[in-house]
Amino acid sequence: MTDVPAPFYRHRLPARLWHWVNALSVFVMLMSGLMILSAHPRLYWGRYGANADHAWFEILPGHVRIGPVMLPGFGIFGVTQGGQNYTVNPLFTIPSHYDLAGSREWHFAFAWILVVPGILYLAWTLIGRHRRELAPTLDELRPANVLHDINEHAHLRFPTGEAAKRYNILQKLSYVGIIFIAIPGAILTGLTLSPGMNAAWPWLLDLTGGRQSARSIHFICAMALAAFILVHLVMVVLAGPINEIRSMVTGWYRPAPDRISTDSDPAVGSAT
């Protein structure tokens, strides 16, 4: 008979608060950002860019072009509904009708909700034990361990028992990338796109390589966040949504019983 592991305190209060505040602000900013993008659905590199210039990214009817590659719009980009063409599906934008001024107001308002708690969370992470929980060790970064984790997740074999109490290397790399690269990158390039900030800190344009490069980097960081959220939600569903969501609401998590084949590898951690 397999013993059922006792619940353990998985997420402390600052992490849980930041998670939900961040989720709300990121969703609103992504949706309002798509409305802003729809005003000129082309991205360039350098200081200048207009319709006659070469764009590395472009939204077309039913498709998205990235360099020379044409991809389907996946029902999000270049859609037609009710006989009307939309650059971005209204289901994925705020507001749901074309309103550039309104989308900017939503975007800037929730930017503060993202930035202020984010700075507090970052400080808490750097000075507290959460930094040690997220920092990958040299042993975890060994290719064999990384490939092991990829193989386990690909076969939907999620950590159990004591292994579920630790972040695995895939989690650590993704969380570090989002917290320390994607979100700061989006904030920095967002500031670069502000004319007021250009006047106060003109070096921002030089740092990012120009306004159009800043806009492109801003979009790439936003899409990295969107991809992370999508994968995160899929993993939550596959790993057991009730248990996962309860842990992010109350802090308490109940791991599944031990699996010897998984727990024999110390690099494997929790599933979400």
Image (tube, grey):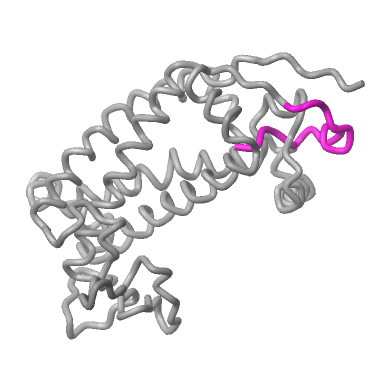
The dominant secondary structure in magenta is: loop
Q: Quadrant of the C terminus?
A: top right
Q: Return the residue nearer the eye: 194 or 96.
A: 96
| Left or right of 124 on screen, residue 175 | right
| Residue 136 shown in magenta | no
Q: Is residue 250 above or below residue 153?
A: above
Which residue is drawn at the image coordinates 64% and 43% (left, top)?
Answer: 238
| Residue 264 shown in magenta | yes
Q: Return the residue nearer the eye: 27 or 66.
A: 27
Which residue is drawn at the image coordinates 25% and 73% (left, top)?
Answer: 42
| Left or right of 171 on screen, residue 264 | right
At which x and y percent is residue 154? 72, 53
| Left or right of 181 on screen, residue 161 | right
At which x and y percent is residue 22? 36, 34
Which residue is drawn at the image coordinates 35% and 78% (left, top)?
Answer: 62
Identify the magenta region.
256-272
Q: Return the residue nearer the eye: 185 or 159.
A: 159
At which x and y percent is residue 68? 42, 84
Which residue is drawn at the image coordinates 27% and 44% (left, top)?
Answer: 28
**Residue 109 quadrant:** top left
